[in-house]
Image: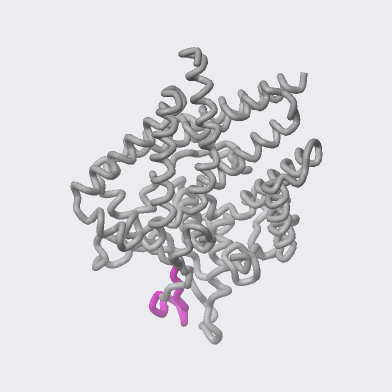
Amino acid sequence: MIERFAPGGFYYWHPDETFDARAVPLQQRVVASLCAYPAVYGLIAMRCVLALILIFGLLTGWAESLALFLLLSLVVFVNVRVRYSMEGADQLMGILLGGLSLASLAPGSGMVQNACLWFIAIQSAMSYLTAGISKSQIPAWRDGSYLMAVLRTNQYGHPLAARSVRNTAMARWLSRFIIAFESTFPLALFTGAPGALFFCGLGGMFHLMNAYFMGLNVFFWTFLSTYPAVLHAALQFQGWVFGR
Amino acid sequence: MLPYVIVAVFAVWLFVSLLAQLPAMKKLRSWNHFGLIPNWYFFTGRMLMFDLKLCCRDGSGPGSYSEWREVPLPVPKPWWRIFWNPRRRLGKGLIDVTAELLEVRRAGKRDLAPSTLAYRTTLWYVRSHRPPGAQRDFQFSIQSRNPVRPSEAPSILFLSDVHR
């Protein structure tokens, strides 16, 4: 994939020909100079190294905080650099890293840690809710024709998935199920542990299917990484309301 | 003091994120240059219902062109894509570029399209993939095909200027 940043690749930015100073926003010109080929490879490598360091917990305290902010900056750089190709999962990744970076500034504060978990849980719930409600406003989603078409495209389709929604009634009910699941996901925060486990289980299966059939693999990892925060929020809400 | 500031930042960020989801606040989402104000409208664009093709043709004289040929933007589907699937982004790149070019045209600013990053990125990519010995002049187009009705001829969504 990284060869796409090299000359001839879709993400290659030619220093003289890609930009028109009248039309390109300032931050893209700044990023362009920082992320020119082949320097962009260094940023991608640094992002991998920082992610591994954080996954294995090799840093603590201010060093960990610094690493998180650095990783967040790199994610933002790449979001701007790979402007055409961004997905919802990339946005969530930035939000997760932003939340974790902020929380790392006050590691001893229970209030901040709790606020961070609620922030992530609400962002996650809001993403499903918005996606569900916006789909419900589209007639092609409600009658199943949107899903039928998307599952036949080269980009997001799969022969097996396309065959399984060949029937209009099947496509319509599957579309309505997706709309209902996404629109009701915020209930996970307010229905205690059983509700949270139900919605997270359903969400896990939903993203697994999307990863396999539609190729949306980053959604699987990113959205599932918010589920512990969803569970935390649900348990805390249950404690507030029912006192247990 | 610091914990209260951090909690306030979380609250403001959440509030702005919430506002950005409201249809009336579409403008707010367009400021999201750093990807930190989310846009959670997944799979609602009409364009995702179509197969897009990036095509190029050569010009051999005034008004005389070759047939359209597809510029490769492969979207392989390996069985391990659930773990590792970066090449899917090329197809998404074409979708995003097309959306931006159509938005410029919808706004009645077609003349400005060649100065946009979307146009220039596509132009540079097409130019890099022209076969050796091709005619000097060329033009690119983005075409769409309905996957539900594959026998229908593709339609041209965007036609570039002639370049050399």
Compared across the picture, whether A217 is left or right of A24 comes to left
| Quadrant position of residue B124 | bottom right
- Front in this rendered view, residue B72 or B11: B11
Q: Which residue: 36% across, 59% down?
A: A157
- Here the colouring is one colour
Residue sticking out furthest to the right: A62
Q: Which residue: 46% across, 29% down?
A: B22
Residue B15 covered by magenta stretch: no
Q: Which residue: 74% across, 29% down?
A: A107
Q: Position of residue A166 (x, y in %)?
A: 22, 56
* The C terminus of chain B lies in quadrant: bottom right
| Quadrant position of residue B44 | top left
Compared across the picture, whether A5 is left or right of A210 comes to right
Q: Position of residue B90 (x, y in %)?
A: 51, 62
| Quadrant position of residue A38 | bottom right
| Magenta stretch prevailing secondary structure | strand
Q: Position of residue B38 (x, y in %)?
A: 54, 38
* The N terminus of chain B lies in quadrant: top right
Region rendered in magenta = B54-68
Residue B65 covered by magenta stretch: yes
